[in-house]
Amino acid sequence: MRLATLNDGSLDGRLILVSQDGRHATTAPASTLIGALQNWTQAEPALRECAAALEAGKAATLAFDPQRCAAPLPRSPQWLDASAFLNHGRLMETAFGTPPIPDFDTVPVMYQGASDDFLGPHANVPLPSEADGIDFEGEFGVIVGEVPLGASPTQALAAVRLLVQLNDWSLRALGQREVRTGFGFLQAKPSTAFAPFAVTPDELGPAWSDGRLRLRLHIEWNGERFGEPSAAPMNFHFGQLIAHAARTRRLRAGTLIGSGTVSNVERAAGSACIAERRMIEKIDLGEVRSGFMRFGDRVRMEARFENGEPGPFGVLDQRVVDAGRPA
Amino acid sequence: MRLATLNDGSLDGRLILVSQDGRHATTAPASTLIGALQNWTQAEPALRECAAALEAGKAATLAFDPQRCAAPLPRSPQWLDASAFLNHGRLMETAFGTPPIPDFDTVPVMYQGASDDFLGPHANVPLPSEADGIDFEGEFGVIVGEVPLGASPTQALAAVRLLVQLNDWSLRALGQREVRTGFGFLQAKPSTAFAPFAVTPDELGPAWSDGRLRLRLHIEWNGERFGEPSAAPMNFHFGQLIAHAARTRRLRAGTLIGSGTVSNVERAAGSACIAERRMIEKIDLGEVRSGFMRFGDRVRMEARFENGEPGPFGVLDQRVVDAGRPA
């Protein structure tokens, strides 16, 4: 089941169901995704019935246009993003010049991001300055139902309702300062953006197992191939990440947990963010060669199954614009 | 104007107006505080008219019971907490054993906390373990209207709609690890709690000026005086804190910005958190003497004007309980 949200000017948008071929959509029997998540036991069967009718050609359809989409969940109770690919984390320690994190291999690191103002898949990204070190970060995430305080990783994994694909936009020059304060990222993290579809785990078949997604994230920067790392070797699975977040507080339905930047040890896979490529250049070539993004630059992200077929999330394709200059 | 929210089982509660003497309340002409904040230009005059009718004895009243209160804003788009009393920050660097933060005197440090599940003034505080280093942190905060990306401190200060008093509950043993990762506080910050009333700045008269509150925060731990530091010497004012938060993203109406733990250089004022007292003991007496909180412990916080009269926020009085043991 593929869910999307039309941007209708409201904070939560309007929930729709989208067909497997991505061409047709129908109004969902729940007005918003957050409303459905808060009442999932009742909402899910009705949504699945509607999705089946859509595939069977028995639902009233509207032409689907991803340009009209907001993030599938335009705002969320919490947005908690981990760094579950240790290869990325180690490279970023080098990039930030920070000391190795204790317990890095055994306890996830995770920051709390803004969850009130997510961007849709084709929304422009308004930022104040190119000097801030504009970077993309290709990731996957899960949306959970209620998770009680102290849930185990197994209990936590059972609370996964939907999977998403996202770009955790980052401003590296600001992040370097913020990580050194110990207070975490804040100015370094403008609004996060999402591919159009939030999907139920069954949409992935065997590509969702052990709390991990066996998909590659194909990334193009200004139309040029940047990387296609696989999410399979995630060092902590999503059940572990959710349980980490719930250790001292309950999580409300709709909470969003991110994987952190997808990253592989194999250099041939490329990267899912510029900062990582820069560090690899420095290590392998002796010098940083890539700059960060400029106003007008685009980044396109699309998940694919390991056989190369398109994944279920749709395409995330955005342009960075100068926040100080009216469109 | 004093606003409170009754806990009616819904996520946003039911907005009420409370009389100056704190004894009477009346249903507000807006059902929730977040709704009023999203439409403040229209909502404020209606709220003020209703508040005037309440004072004049011309409104239908209900007896006011703070036990029935949720946080005045039970959930918020963002909760961003600074460390604007540098005396506290310097002592905490010693406590955490972390290196001095660069630019500490000129750029605020700020973390993003969970904003989806705030506690009311008399709610029990369920926590998983006494070994986590249970601590209170007495603070003040502001609730803002919409703030555009890049707002100046002066513009930001003009967006302040309401003032609040809060306890930023902290788990110090977890915080020490999290601050070292650089990703900021997450497990170290269970739900934040609030005194019953959110008030318009005019309620403070001259005690609100230059973006600072000239109030003392009186704190008792298990009925014993703990401290009454003054909020007047806040090193960054709230306009500066809001502008810091809005540097790379807009803030939605209802965003909450905190001062960080109120802290004075003068030892006689006492402290607003245990971790700070412990560091002072270590510095002044050569050893830490105070432990952290135990299950069953209470902490009471009440702001007072400098002449000793009660401040406008009401009383925050909570008990820590074992999350693993049913009440």
Image (spheres, coloured by chain):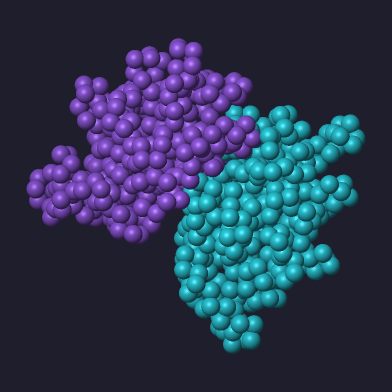
Chain colours: A cyan, B purple
Task: Depth check: give the residue in front, B154 or A40.
Answer: A40
The furthest residue to the left: B57
Q: Is residue B11 left or right of residue B199?
A: right
Task: Depth check: give the residue in front, B76 or B67.
Answer: B67
- Residue A202 % position (x, y): 67, 71
- Whether residue B152 is situated above or below residue A33 in the rendered picture: above
- Residue A282 % position (x, y): 85, 34
- Residue B258 % position (x, y): 43, 35
Question: Residue at left 27%, top 37%?
Answer: B315
The furthest residue to the right: A285
Q: Is residue A222 left or right of residue A18?
A: right
Res. B2 image quadrant: top left
Question: Residue at left 17%, top 39%?
Answer: B20
Task: Depth check: give the residue in front, A232 or B205.
Answer: A232
Q: Which part of the image, by quadrant, shows the N terminus of chain A?
A: bottom right
- Residue B251 % position (x, y): 48, 44
Question: Residue at left 26%, top 45%?
Answer: B3
Q: Give the tally of numbered discs.
A: 0
Is residue B45 visible in this depiction of the protein?
no
